[in-house]
Structure formats: structure tokens, C-alpha cells
Image (cartoon, grey):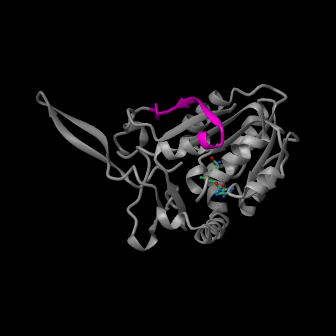
Amino acid sequence: MVQFPLTLSEDTSISSKDCMNPEQDDTLRQQSQEIWNQNAAFWDRLIGDTGNRFHRTMVEPAALKLLALTPGETVLEVACGNGAFARRMAEAGVQVLATDFSTGLLEHARRRTQHESISYALVDATEEEQLLALGQRRFDAAVCNMGLMDMPVIDPLFAALSRVLKPGGRFVFSVQHPCFNSNGANKTVELQDQDGELATIAAIKVSRYATPWTERAMGAAGQETPHYQFHRPINQLLNAGFRAGLVLHGLEEPVDEAEPNSSKWMAWSNFQELPPVLVGRFRLG
Ligand SMILES: C[S@@+](CC[C@H](N)C(=O)[O-])C[C@H]1O[C@@H](n2cnc3c(N)ncnc32)[C@H](O)[C@@H]1O
């Protein structure tokens, strides 16, 4: 999804400490929802019926591998966007309840979906009660692709997952890789003389990682209004699941395996040792 880490101005920064303030979380949630509605048409065009290349080559294969869906299962999708992954899962023969907090994106999702095995619902994943209302011990699996880093709080989601999943149920998430694909990680391409041959070295310089922060970010080139993102180092991301009684049960770090592209230096295919996505599977007890 995000291929263009940005330099952000000071006035869009909010400290991680402020984000722990529930009043501000509410304001952030509202603003975040408005922004996703404003950008809904843009994201719908970007993702289309079946996902963009970033999704199709990295997010989707890793998430499907970890989900290991079995026909007939019931799956909850959190932050489903325009429903591209829900449609992909429906093709695997499962029943999907796909949720998002953007009415705009849900409209696009419904317009693009013919599958009877998919239903959509408006749910704010930072509100535990809204998730619990979907049905306790109802789902064999749950998935949230490229969504957790857009949520100011993730404990309510994990707490709800521990109750809406069936015993042994799994939760698969994908996020921008917190080490290599954040606003604290800058891509560089350098020239190096290697025994008389000039070689280009693609690298990522990481200046921030350990402390969570909140910023406005452009998810993809051309997005008009930057949305809020909430950087969490890997320990904070995983500890949220552990606190809710989930155990980590699988991890993938897909890279872009397309041909390196010398006319587009910042393409992820030029950084094949540096995964832009982290995909994990938790399991309930
Ligand atoms: C980067 S998009 C990913 C969408 C989709 N999963 C995909 O991979 O194409 C992030 C999605 O998270 C949704 N989102 C952000 N915060 C949310 C929240 N608190 N509750 C539910 N959805 C949320 C947005 O509306 C948007 O659809």
C-alpha cells in the first residue's frame, strides 16, 4: 500500500503520549473517519476489484497463506476498505462479514460485490462493543489487512477478538513493516565502486522506530488528504495481542520479487532484502 514514506511538517505531529488521552482518541477517531470518507473514491480506484499490485503480490498471498481458509468457514474482516480481499476470500468458499468505519468505502465495496457469501457492516474497530455485537464465538478466523497502523488504539480490537473468535480461531493482520516502511524510514539509492564496477545500492535509513508516534501520511501517491497513522514498534503491536490472550503462531515478511526497476529507483522491487509488509497470525488459546 504505502510506497512513499513522506517528510511531514511539525504541525501534523501528535505525540504518542497525547494519543493515550481518550478524549483526543475520540477526536482522532472522528477526524480519521472523515478523512477516510473523503479519500474513499481515491482508494476505491487505487484498489479496484481485485487489489493493486502491492496487495496482489505481497499482502494477499501472505495473508491467505497464514489464514489457510477452509471452505464453509466464517471469517470476520476488519477495515475491509472496498472489499477486494473479502471477494478474494469468498472465492475460497468462506462466508465473510466485512467491516469498516468508512461509509464511503463500504458503498464502493457493496457496489463492487456480487457474492452472496459476503455481507458488509459499519463497525469502528476501536470500539470493542461494536465488535462484540457481531456475535461472540461466531468466527473461525478474522483478518485485518493494512489497517492496524491506521487505528489510534488496538487493544479494544484484540480484546474483542478474544471473544468473537471461536476457541482455536486465528487472527491474521498485515501492516506496513514498522522497521522498513514507516515515516521514520527513508529510502536511498547510492553508487558504490565494487572492484572497478559501479554498482547501485538500494538501502533504507531508519531514524525512528522504538517510540510510537502519530502522523498524517499519504497512503499512496495522489491521495488528496493525508490520513492519520499510528506507528508502533513490533513489540507494542504483538504485545497488544498477547495481553488479550492470543499467541503468535506465524509470521511472514513478503518482499517485492518483481524485476528490479532502474527507471523507478524507489520501487520496492529495488529493495528486495527489505520487506515493506509484516504479516502475522495470532491464535486464540
Ligand atoms: C489502508 S486502508 C486498507 C483497506 C483494505 N483492508 C485494503 O487492504 O485494501 C485502511 C482501512 O482502514 C479503515 N479504518 C481505519 N480506521 C478504522 C477503524 N477505527 N475502524 C474500522 N476501519 C478503520 C479505513 O476506512 C480503510 O478502509
Ligand 1 sits in which quadrant? bottom right
Residue farthest to the left, as pictured: 196
User: Does residue 230 appear to the left or right of 67 in the view shown?
Assistant: left
On whether residue 65 falls in the magenta region, the answer is no
Q: Which image quarter holds the C terminus? A: top right
User: Does residue 201 appear to the left or right of 71 in the view shown?
Assistant: left
Q: In the image, residue 221 lies at what x, y percent?
A: 49, 57
94 w.r.t. 162: above or below:
above
Front residue (pair 183, 245): 245
Front residue (pair 157, 285): 285
Q: Residue at x 77, y 47 (%)?
A: 98
Front residue (pair 154, 74): 154
Q: In the image, residue 175 lies at what x, y percent?
A: 55, 45
User: Does residue 41 appear to the left or right of 238 in the view shown?
Assistant: right
Residue farthest to the bottom, as pictured: 11
Give, as a single range, the part of the protein colored magenta: 242-258
Where residue 269 sits, quadrant-wise, is: top left
Residue farthest to the right, as pictured: 116
Q: In the image, residue 8 lies at what x, y percent?
A: 40, 65
Q: Is residue 162 visible?
A: yes
On whether residue 245 falls in the magenta region, the answer is yes
